[in-house]
Amino acid sequence: MNEMRTDGAAMRYQSGVSELRQAWAVDIHCEDCGRTRRFHRRELLELDMEGFRTFPQLGSKLCCRHCRERRGEGKNISLNPRWFKHFLQ
Ligand SMILES: [Zn+2]
């Protein structure tokens, strides 16, 4: 009947506020090679559409392409969200 019911991720976050929608950008910093990549608002909204709701959730799916191409996992990354000011009360 309701296809949304079969999608656990969508159900779980359906009523919550998406963290990704509260930031205008997020900087993804690789602790291994020092590179930083920025996702802008438009990319965050696209990721939100794909089902990502929190930055830890997003971070668990990301890796540093530079490090992965060279040696390792590229999973030693940290996310630094740039919040909209009106969400910082
Ligand atoms: Zn790296």
Image (spheres, rainbow, N blue to C red):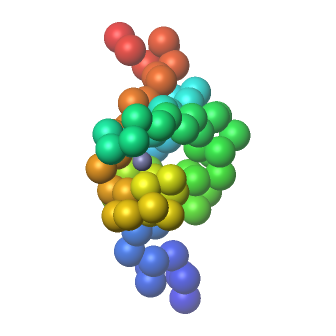
Could you say where residue 54 lies in the image, as x and y percent from the top left? 38, 47
Frontmost residue, 49 versus 70: 70
Instruction: Give the farthest residue toward the right.
Output: 42
User: Which residue does the image show at 58% across and 62% down from the upper left?
Assistant: 50
Which quarter of the picture shows residue 31? top left
Q: Nearer the viewer, residue 6 or 52?
A: 52
Evaluate whether residue 41 shows in this view.
Answer: yes
Compared to residue 23, the image places residue 9 above or below, namely: below
Q: Residue 64 versus residue 53: which sits nearer the camera?
A: 64
Q: Residue at x 45, y 61 (%)?
A: 70
Q: From this viewpoint, which residue is outermost toward the bottom? A: 1
Q: Looking at the image, is 57 positioned above or below residue 2?
A: above
Q: In which quadrant of the rendered view does residue 25 lie?
A: top right
Number of numbered markers: 0
Q: Position of residue 89 (x, y in %)?
A: 35, 11
Can residue 52 be seen in this snapshot? no
The percent coordinates of residue 64 (x first, y second) are: 45, 53
Name which residue lies at 55% across and 88% down.
1
Q: Residue at coordinates 38% horizontally, 14% vertically from top-left?
A: 88
Report the front residue among 45 and 31.
31
Q: Taking 20 as reference, is 55 left or right?
A: left
Q: Position of residue 62 (x, y in %)?
A: 44, 57
**Residue sticking out furthest to the front:** 70
